[in-house]
Image (cartoon, rainbow, N blue to C red):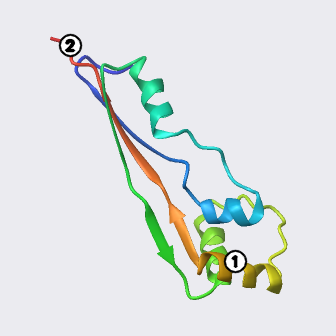
Amino acid sequence: MLNQNGILLLSTFAEQNLKEIKQSTGFGLNYFSLNELEQIFKVYFNEVKITQELIELSFDNALDVFRHLKFSGVNSLGFYPLNKSFLKEFEEKFQNKLTYHPVFILCKNDIK
């Protein structure tokens, strides 16, 4: 339970997170929009501030993109064949880029 005048800070990801992976494989999570997040938290808190970032990482080749995902532990591809034609198509379509979309949420109730 949050103390009076306490602050809750949390982070999550939003709709554009790993968009390249979802577009190329069909695998990915469904994320709340910023508006949906605000509506969820405004029910419980009288002050909600949400900020976001778009972080685009660039890699030398498509295989490095998928190695990055594997080593980060966020990969949910299961068994998806990363053959030459798939990697070539990924490079052409996304130029070996990967987007992260973190969201930071500050919630508090000002009790006077």
Q: Residue at x 48, y 25 (%)?
A: 40
Q: Residue at x 74, y 85 (%)?
A: 88
Within 10 Å of disc 1 (Cα), the crowding (few <14, some 14-19, many 20+) is: many
Residue at mark 1: 90
The relative height of residue 102 versus residue 87 in the rendered view (above or below) is above
x and y, in percent, of residue 41 in the image:
42, 25
SS assignment at label 1: helix
The relative height of residue 46 versus residue 13 in the rendered view (above or below) is above
What amino acid type is highlighted by mark number 2? Ile
Seen in the image, is 58 located left or right of residue 42?
right
What amino acid type is highlighted by mark number 1? Phe
Residue at mark 2: 111
Residue toward you, 105 or 2:
105
Seen in the image, is 35 located left or right of residue 108?
right
Gap in angstroms between the C-alphas marked 2 and 1:
52 Å
Specify the quadrant of the image occupied by residue 10: top left
Position of the C terminus, as image quadrant, is: top left
x and y, in percent, of residue 52 in the image:
38, 50
The relative height of residue 8 versus residue 82 in the rendered view (above or below) is above
Q: Residue at x 25, y 16 (%)?
A: 4
